[in-house]
């Protein structure tokens, strides 16, 4: 932690010099997310300087050990987030400005102040959104309609900007986006160690299911091509978020509207809009929510997407409802895969959250299923069987 703090202070001093905060007082506090973040040490910062407005900042400093760094593709994670804040933000903000998207309808990134790209010291400094009135959503609760609809509206704006990127900067899009491959769990043939780890994760998950469901789910999960198909474009590539879940969103109420803002961009990749939507819905809701709101939420997403495309002057034919429905049907089974890979992290209690620093090992991420996991995973399997996905 001391090394992370030292790294952060170096970055802050450079940033604050550039903003002419001299003299200054820096108050820096380490915080925890209780199992919601694994790659970085997190800090909130208050900067006070005479005759200048106080600065309320938030920082992420790499804290991942060497073993886990390789296993979690941390180099890719940190490089991707840096690319988003230093390049993609500028492109997307420029597109929204040139198409005169009203402020209240724009996709908003947290204000970015600076970074450190050095290996092992990767740091991102941005505004502290909590000081601006944003709040987190309890990751242990199933989403409600108000938060789900706000988050999906925000996601639709993000995807619409990818289509606009392709329209207004086709050469830049072609240079960047097709090469933005999702790196975790893809690429080379998995080692025997990783195969054994996956088998263990599957076995732990199957324990919570009804006996009559286990063989069907096991057969699906042990398909050797499964991970090779995951997080890939279906047709034209679209800039996808890759980890769009409640833990990576903050919310703020303005008048009668609830605003959502995404705060983590480490897994942005060339993918499919439906992939982000499957991820968001199934990693943040229970069976009862989906029974009441699943179809309604899909309709809401597509309406918001079309509205965002119209504001950006992009033809609606770039992503038709027919194509969207087809993509959702094809990617729906991945909800089960995500249930094994991601849901344990979503539902883990803070005191049981795995370490990633020092000599931590990837095997630490095989967590004993808790009651919340059992409830949520059963719901995912029930839905996917009932809807004929697996």
Image (cartoon, helix red, strand yellow):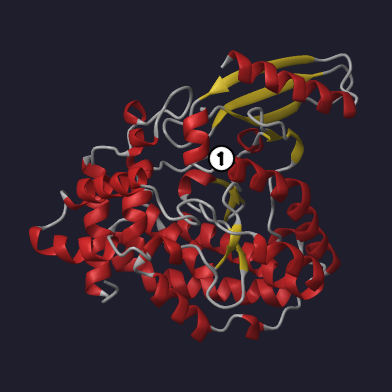
Tag count: 1
Please identify the quadrant where the N terminus is shown: top right
Q: Nearer the viewer, residue 79 or 50?
A: 79
The quarter of the displayed image where residue 218 is located? bottom left
Q: Nearer the viewer, residue 238 or 382?
A: 238
Residue to which mark 1 is pinned: 74
* Residue sitting at x 32%, y 33%: 349
* Residue sitting at x 74%, y 72%: 166
* Residue sitting at x 25%, y 51%: 202
Residue 244 screen position, x and y as percent: 51, 54
Decide if residue 257 is in sight here. yes
Residue 259 screen position, x and y as percent: 59, 53
Residue 257 screen position, x and y as percent: 58, 56
Work out whether 247 lies above or below 10.
below
* Residue sitting at x 24%, y 37%: 368
Work out whether 13 lies above or below 326.
above
Please identify the quadrant where the C terminus is shown: bottom left
Q: Nearer the viewer, residue 156 or 213?
A: 213
Decide if residue 38 is in sight here. no
Residue 337 screen position, x and y as percent: 34, 58
**Mark 1 Cα shell of 10 Å, populated few (<14), some (14-19), many (≥20):** many
Q: Secondary structure at mark 1?
A: helix
For this view, does 248 lie left or right of residue 315?
A: left
Work out whether 245 lies above or below 125.
below
For this view, does 207 lie left or right of residue 229?
A: left
For this view, does 170 lie left or right of residue 264?
A: right
């Amino acid at each position: 932690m001391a090394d992370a703090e030292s790294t952060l202070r170096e970055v802050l001093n450079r940033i604050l010099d550039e903003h002419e905060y001299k003299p200054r007082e820096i108050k820096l506090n380490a915080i925890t997310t209780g199992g919601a973040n694994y790659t970085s040490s997190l800090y909130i910062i208050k900067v006070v300087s005479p005759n200048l407005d106080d600065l309320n900042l938030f920082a992420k400093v790499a804290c991942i050990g060497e073993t886990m760094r390789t296993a979690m593709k941390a180099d890719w994670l940190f490089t991707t987030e840096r690319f988003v804040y230093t390049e993609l933000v500028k492109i997307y903000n420029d597109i929204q400005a040139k198409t005169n998207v009203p402020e209240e309808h724009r996709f908003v990134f947290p204000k970015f102040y600076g970074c450190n790209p050095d290996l092992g010291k990767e740091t991102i400094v941005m505004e502290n959104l909590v000081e601006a009135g944003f709040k987190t959503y309890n990751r242990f609760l199933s989403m409600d309609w108000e938060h789900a609809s706000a988050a999906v509206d925000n996601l639709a704006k993000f995807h619409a900007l990818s289509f606009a990127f392709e329209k207004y900067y086709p050469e830049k899009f072609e240079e960047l986006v097709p090469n933005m491959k999702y790196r975790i769990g893809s690429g080379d043939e998995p080692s025997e160690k990783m195969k054994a780890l996956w088998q263990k994760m599957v076995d732990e998950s199957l324990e919570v299911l009804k006996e009559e469901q286990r063989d069907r789910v096991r057969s699906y999960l042990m398909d050797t091509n499964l991970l090779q198909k995951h997080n890939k474009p279906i047709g034209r590539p679209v800039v996808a978020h890759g980890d769009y879940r409640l833990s990576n969103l903050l919310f703020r109420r303005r008048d009668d509207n609830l605003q959502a803002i995404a705060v983590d961009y480490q897994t942005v990749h060339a993918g499919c809009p439906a992939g982000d939507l499957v991820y968001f819905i199934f990693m943040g809701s229970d069976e009862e929510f989906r029974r009441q709101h699943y179809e309604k939420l899909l309709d809401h997403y597509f309406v918001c997407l079309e509205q965002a495309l119209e504001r950006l002057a992009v033809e609606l034919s770039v992503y038709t409802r027919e194509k969207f429905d087809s993509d959702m049907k094809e990617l729906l089974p991945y909800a089960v895969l995500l249930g094994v890979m991601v849901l344990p992290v979503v539902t883990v209690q803070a005191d049981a959250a795995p370490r990633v620093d020092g000599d931590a090992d990837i095997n630490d991420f095989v967590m004993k299923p808790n009651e919340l996991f059992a409830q949520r995973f059963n719901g995912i399997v029930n839905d996917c069987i009932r809807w004929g996905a697996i």
